[in-house]
Amino acid sequence: MEEHALKALGQRITCLRQQREWSLSHLAERAGIAKSNLSRIEQGIGNPTLDTLWRMARQLEVPFGTLVAPATGALIDSGMRVTLLEQGTDDACPVDAYLMHCDPHGRRIAEAHTPHARERVEVIHGHIRVGPTEAPTELDAGDSLEFNADCEHLYAAGDQPVAMLITILYAPRRPRG
């Protein structure tokens, strides 16, 4: 990520953490990362992995897009490039839309999203195995799949680059109280 995007991301994480009145230590522990790493991310000098960002979004109970929206451009990790295209504005039913590119033979095991989240994958080009790790589905260009994303799931590209549209539908937010 570019420097300005890292700084914006760090500010967003700090803001979300402080809204919950959580210490740096508390969020780091919940997200399973070192406090020093979280501190660097919040300062805009760390370079978090996609998995780290997903874990933080889950612990902060916000859609991934809400966490990364200030960071423009693609998030890149292990041969995967993810770009937030659009984020739904209806808090009652949050939706994120992404463009995801995978390098040939790219492989990623994604952690579970928030409870009751659903994911829809539409392949633009290439061949990929995607879905819950216990039962992924083979998809080619033009194919789509929707699955429960509140479990660990896999993206495993074939011999060619893959491009996909990914839509994540989160469970309706409960009022805080």
Image (spheres, grey):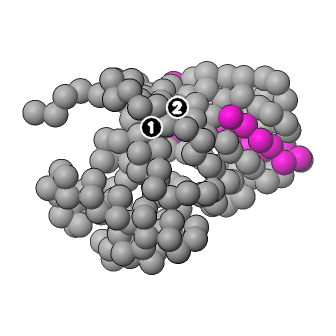
Question: Residue 151 or 27: which is nearer the viewer?
Answer: 27
Are the residues flagged by discs 2 and 1 in contact, CB closer than 8 Å? Answer: yes
- Please, what is the three-letter code of the amino acid marked with disc 2? Ile
For this view, does 148 lie left or right of residue 23?
right
Answer whether residue 149 is magenta in the image: yes
Q: Nearer the viewer, mark 2 or mark 1?
A: 2
Q: Residues within 10 Å of mark 2 (few under 14, many from 20)?
A: many
Instruction: Kindly report the distance in space between the C-alpha atoms of the residues bearing marks 2 and 1.
Output: 9 Å
Looking at the picture, how far across and down is residue 101, in whole percent? Answer: 73, 48
- The residue indicated by pointer 1 is 113
The magenta segment is 148-165
- Please, what is the three-letter code of the amino acid marked with disc 1? His
Looking at the picture, how far across and down is residue 78, in whole percent? Answer: 67, 60
Residue at left 46%, top 31%?
88
Question: Residue 31 or 67: which is nearer the viewer?
Answer: 67
Q: Is residue 7 visible?
A: yes
